[in-house]
C-alpha cells in the first residue's frame, strides 16, 4: 500500500518541508530509501525495524521503498527516523495520518524518541507548508512550541504516537511560556556596576551599544578589559522575540541549545580563542555548520588578545563584517549564515603589556613594539569605529564603596538613543538598524555638521591625516553621541568626543 506524509529537513539554518512516500508491497523483501539520503539516513533502517518490533508489531520481511522529496536536496541526520517509521506503518495498514500533520525525530532501538538539531527551523518550515499539528521528540517540544500558529506535540515514544494516531489516547499540545522569555531577556548575572571606575571606557561602551559600533580596548594586563567586554550585552537592548527566534535557529542547528530549553533569550557573547581554526570561526564542514561569527548573531564577538590571532582571521572577518552574512559553497550547494554581530577587540599595548602605563615601566624595544602592534591589520582597524584606552584601575577606584551605575540604567539610555535614531530613519523610509550601518551616502544625509563642528573636523583631518574611511567613522560615532543626547543636529562637542575615540590610531599605529 502507498502511504504519504510530511516531515521537514534542514538546509543551512533554514528548514524545508519534505514529503515522505512509502510503498509496502509483497515483492521480494527489500528496504530502500531514495531521494538523496546520505549514509546517516540509510542507517535508520536498523533503528526502524527494531523500534517497530519493540513497540509490539510484526515487521517480517516486507518490500519497502521510501522516497524523500524534493529529491534534489540532500537528506542527512536522524530526524527522518520517526516519519519514515510512521510511513511504513501506514503502508502496512497499521496506522494512518492526516494531511495537516508533520513529523520529525530520532528514535532509539527501543522506540523512545531522541531530540534532533534544528527543531525550531523545521517547525517553522512545517508551518510555512501549511501544517498545523507537529509531532516532535519530547525533548524538542519546548523549542518547537515557540512557533505560533501550530500545535506542537512532544512525543516520548513510537508506541505513544501510534496510540494517539489510532485514537486510543489524547495528547495535549505543548504550551509556550512567553513570560520566561520576557523575564530572562534582560536579566543578566553580571552587571556594569561590578566594574569600578573606568568612566571613559564605560562611556565608550555605551556609545558602542547605542550605535552598534565595533570597539577596540587597549590597556595593560588586569585593567578590566575582559570584564568590561563581557558586560556589553547587559547594556544592549533586550532581544526582540524575532531576534531570539533567529539566534535559536542557529544554536539549535549547532547542537548548542540545551535539551528542554525553548529559546536563547539573551544576546550571545562569543569569545573564540586566538588558536581557534579558521573553520571554527567562519563555519564549515561537509554539511556546513555555523561558526563563531554566526553564533555571535545579534550579540558580541569578543576577540581577546587581538594581535595573537593569525592574519587569516582578519581575512575571514572582512566580508561578514561588511555584509552581515557569510556564504559557504559546497558540492551540496551554497549555504548562507547570518553574521550580524558587534565586534569587540581587546589587546595590550605591547608584548610586556605596560607601554604608556603609569604603574610599571615597559621593557619592550621600539622594534618589538612596532612588530607587536603591526600584527593588527589596517583593514580590521578600518572596521572599528571606537578605540579606547583602558588604564590600570586606581587604588582609589578599587576602594570606592559608592555603587557604580547599573547595567539597567545604562541600557535605558542606549534604548532611548536607538529609538531616537529609528524615528529619524523610519520618517525617511529607511531600513537602518544602527548608526554603524550607515553607508557613506546615508552619512552625508544624516550626519550634517554645524559650522563649528565642521571646522574641528577639518582641522583634525589635516592634523591626524584621516582617511576617507576614518572621516566617515567619526561622523557615525558623532551621530550616536548626539542621539544619546536626543539631539537632531551634530555639534562640536560630539565631533570632539568622537575624535578622541580615534586618537589611538596615531598613538599606536602612527597613522
Ligand atoms: N575596574 C575594575 N573593577 C573591579 N574589578 C576589576 C576592575 N578591573 C579589573 N578588575 C579585576 O581584575 C580581574 C582581571 O581583569 P580582566 O581580566 O578584565 O583584565 P584584562 O584587562 O582583561 O587583563 P589581560 O590583559 O590580562 O587580559 C577581574 O576579574 C576583576 O576581578
Ligand atoms: Mg583579558
Ligand atoms: Zn612593553
Image: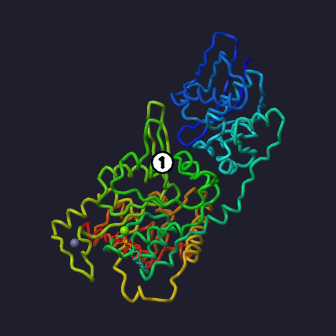
Question: Outermost residue, top direction?
Answer: 28
Task: Say above or below: 18 vs 380.
Answer: above
Identify which residue is drawn at 45% across, 46% down. Answer: 326
Callout 1: CB less than 8 Å from ligand 2:
no
The residue labelled by disc 1 is 325
Does residue 238 appear left or right of residue 303 in this picture? right
Does residue 90 appear left or right of residue 358 in this picture? right
Pick the residue in front: 286 or 349: 286
Q: Quadrant of the C terminus?
A: bottom left
Task: Say above or below: 416 vs 6.
Answer: below
Q: Give the x, y percent position of residue 258.
A: 58, 53
Does residue 39 appear left or right of residue 386 in this picture? right
Q: Quadrant of the N terminus?
A: top right
What is the tally of numbered marks visible in this picture?
1
Ligand 3's image quarter is bottom left
Q: Secondary structure at mark 1?
A: strand
Amino acid at each position: 500500500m502507498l502511504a504519504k506524509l510530511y516531515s521537514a529537513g534542514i538546509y543551512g539554518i533554514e528548514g524545508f518541508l519534505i514529503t515522505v512516500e512509502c510503498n509496502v508491497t509483497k515483492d521480494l523483501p527489500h528496504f530502500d530509501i531514495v531521494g538523496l539520503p546520505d549514509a546517516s539516513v540509510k542507517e535508520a533502517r536498523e533503528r526502524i525495524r527494531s523500534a517497530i518490533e519493540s513497540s509490539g508489531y510484526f515487521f517480517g520481511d516486507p518490500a519497502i521503498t521510501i522516497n524523500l522529496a524534493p529529491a534534489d536536496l540532500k537528506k542527512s541526520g536522524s530526524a527522518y527516523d520517526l516519519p519514515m517509521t510512521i510511513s511504513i506503518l501506514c503502508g502496512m495498514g497499521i496506522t494512518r495520518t492526516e494531511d495537516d500533520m508533520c513529523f520529525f525525530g530520532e528514535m532509539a532501538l527501543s522506540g523512545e524518541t531522541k531530540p534532533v538539531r534544528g527543531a525550531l527551523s523545521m517547525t517553522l518550515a512545517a508551518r510555512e507548508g501549511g501544517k498545523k499539528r507537529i509531532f516532535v521528540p519530547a525533548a524538542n517540544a519546548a523549542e518547537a512550541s515557540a512557533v505560533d500558529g501550530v500545535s506542537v506535540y512532544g512525543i516520548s515514544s513510537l508506541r505513544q504516537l501510534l496510540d494517539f494516531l489510532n485514537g486510543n489516547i489524547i495528547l495535549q499540545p505543548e504550551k509556550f511560556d512567553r513570560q520566561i522569555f520576557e523575564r530572562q531577556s534582560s536579566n543578566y548575572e553580571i552587571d556594569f556596576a561590578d566594574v569600578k571606575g573606568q568612566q571613559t571606557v564605560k562611556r565608550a561602551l555605551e556609545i558602542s551599544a547605542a550605535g552598534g559600533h565595533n570597539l577596540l580596548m587597549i590597556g595593560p594586563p588586569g585593567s578590566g578589559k575582559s570584564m568590561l567586554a563581557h558586560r556589553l550585552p547587559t547594556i544592549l537592548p533586550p532581544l526582540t522575540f524575532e531576534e531570539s527566534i533567529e539566534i535559536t535557529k542557529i544554536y539549535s542547528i549547532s547542537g548548542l541549545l540545551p535539551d528542554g530549553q525553548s529559546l536563547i533569550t539573551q544576546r550571545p557573547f562569543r569569545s573564540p580563542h586566538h588558536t581557534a581554526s579558521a573553520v571554527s570561526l567562519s563555519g564549515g564542514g561537509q554539511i556546513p555548520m555555523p561558526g563563531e561569527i554566526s553564533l555571535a548573531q545579534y550579540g558580541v564577538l569578543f576577540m581577546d588578545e587581538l594581535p595573537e590571532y593569525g592574519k587569516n582571521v582578519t581575512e575571514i572577518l572582512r566580508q561578514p563584517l561588511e555584509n552581515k552574512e557569510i556564504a559557504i559553497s559546497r558540492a551540496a550547494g551554497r549555504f548562507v549564515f547570518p553574521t550580524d554581530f558587534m565586534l569587540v577587540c581587546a589587546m595590550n599595548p605591547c608584548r610586556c603589556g605596560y607601554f604608556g602605563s603609569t604603574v610599571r615601566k615597559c621593557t619592550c624595544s621600539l622594534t618589538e613594539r612596532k612588530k607587536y602592534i603591526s600584527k593588527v591589520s589596517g583593514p580590521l582597524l578600518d572596521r572599528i569605529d571606537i578605540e579606547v584606552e583602558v588604564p590600570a584601575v586606581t587604588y582609589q577606584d578599587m576602594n570606592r564603596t559608592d555603587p557604580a551605575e547599573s547595567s539597567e540604567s545604562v541600557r535605558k539610555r542606549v534604548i532611548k538613543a536607538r529609538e531616537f535614531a529609528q524615528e529619524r530613519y523610519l520618517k525617511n523610509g529607511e531600513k537602518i538598524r544602527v548608526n554603524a550601518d550607515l553607508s557613506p551616502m546615508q552619512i552625508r544625509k544624516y550626519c550634517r555638521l554645524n559650522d563649528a563642528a565642521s571646522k574641528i573636523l577639518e582641522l583634525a583631518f589635516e592634523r591626524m591625516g584621516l582617511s576617507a574611511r576614518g572621516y566617515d567613522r567619526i561622523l557615525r560615532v558623532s551621530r550616536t553621541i548626539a542621539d544619546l543626547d536626543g539631539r537632531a543636529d551634530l555639534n562640536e562637542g560630539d565631533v570632539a568626543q568622537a575624535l578622541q575615540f580615534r586618537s589611538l590610531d596615531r598613538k599606536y599605529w602612527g597613522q
